[in-house]
Image (cartoon, rainbow, N blue to C red):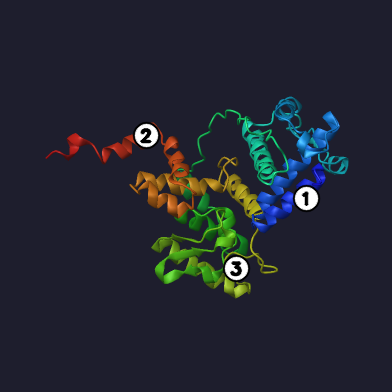
Amino acid sequence: MQNLDFDYQIDDFMLYCRTQQLREKSMQSYEQTLRLFERWCVEQFQINKVDAVTEAVIRRYVDDLIARGKYSFYVDDKRKNVNYPERRRDYRKPISPSTINNYLRNLRVFFNWLERDYLIAKNPMKKIRLLKVNRKAKEYISDEDFKKLISHFDKSYFAEHRDYAMIHLMLDTGMRLGECSELLVDDVILHNRKIHLRAEITKGRRDRSVFFSQRTELILRKWIQYKDRYCESGYLFPVKRGGHNVSVSGFECNFKRYLLRAGLNDNISPHCLRNNFAKRCLMNGMDIFTLSKILGHSSVTVTEQAYLDLTDEDLGKKYANYSPISSIR
């Protein structure tokens, strides 16, 4: 007889995720979502077996998430006592529909897995739909603001020289920050201005290549020479002490500090460099299929979302290249 206890099945599901070689970030997201939902089910309905979860329970959970607000519920009391959620500025503020949708996606994967292995007869997520989300325009940084940002770097400091090179490389290639931070020197083919992104560091777990300009090549050559003088490391972008690669969170903190120093909006994230790459490629006439391959998207449909953020000014500039009347001589 199958053990249908929530805790047992979550452990079994996480083991399955590990065999699928999911990224650590994805696994943490799944486990956090499932542990929170398990505790809520036990506290609210004394449900401790997965086959007792119904569609109505899922809907009650979503309703409760909306009512409770941020940081009002924890997997265990110990974590609550350590994090002091009530001290946060956004304590009990509304949870965004996007966050709730992420929870629902994770729950859907879990219950689909249970259904596939015949552990549940009826999937409670089958009729559950995601919440409607008012789409926000992607972050962008203008030419002027980018010039202002990079003009405030002091490249005599190891970390600032490294981050200066990373910012240029991400804008010129469209790489994700997580991919860029894990690059090895051996991944870079300078004479071909090409970078091989290994499957183990990409979001989609597939090898792909990105390319960079002559200007970025010069920046990288100078950085590698500088790095090798002060740090022995196989990583392209290491920390000075220890030689391990710079962390995503470490770079994000630095990036915010650079924005403040340049007098720019510190709400801009490093991901805006990838968004800028996509928009600039589209504006310069790159076809959507090529852009999708370079960005490493799972489909062209994902890439097409970038078109939604073109402003009237962008469309006007792009139109100028295709005006029928202007082409008549």
Q: Sequence-wise, which precedes: disc 2 or disc 3? A: 3
| Residue drawn at 58 percent across, 70 percent down | 227
Farthest residue, direction left: 329
Q: CA distance from mark 3 to mark 1?
A: 34 Å
Q: Amino acid at mark 1?
A: Asp
x, y percent for residue 221: 48, 69
Q: Sequence-wise, which precedes: disc 1 or disc 2? A: 1
Depth check: 81 or 151 in front?
A: 81
Q: Sequence-wise, which precedes: disc 3 or disc 1? A: 1
Depth check: 154 or 39 in front?
A: 39
| Residue drawn at 44 percent across, 69 percent down | 190
The answer to whether residue 291 is left or right of residue 163 is: left
- Residue position marked by numbered label 3 in the rendering: 235
Q: Amino acid at mark 3?
A: Tyr
Marking on residue 313: 2
Badge 1 marks a residue whose secondary structure is helix
Placement of 296 over or under 126, stated as above or below: below
* Few, some or many residues within 10 Å of mark 2 (<14, 14–19, 20+): few
State yes or no: discs 2 and 3 in contact (Cβ < 8 Å). Answer: no
Q: Quadrant of residue 180?
A: bottom right
Please tell me whether mark 2 or mark 3 is closer to you in this view.
Answer: 3
Depth check: 196 or 251 in front?
A: 196
Q: Amino acid at mark 2?
A: Glu
The answer to whether residue 212 is left or right of residue 228 is: left
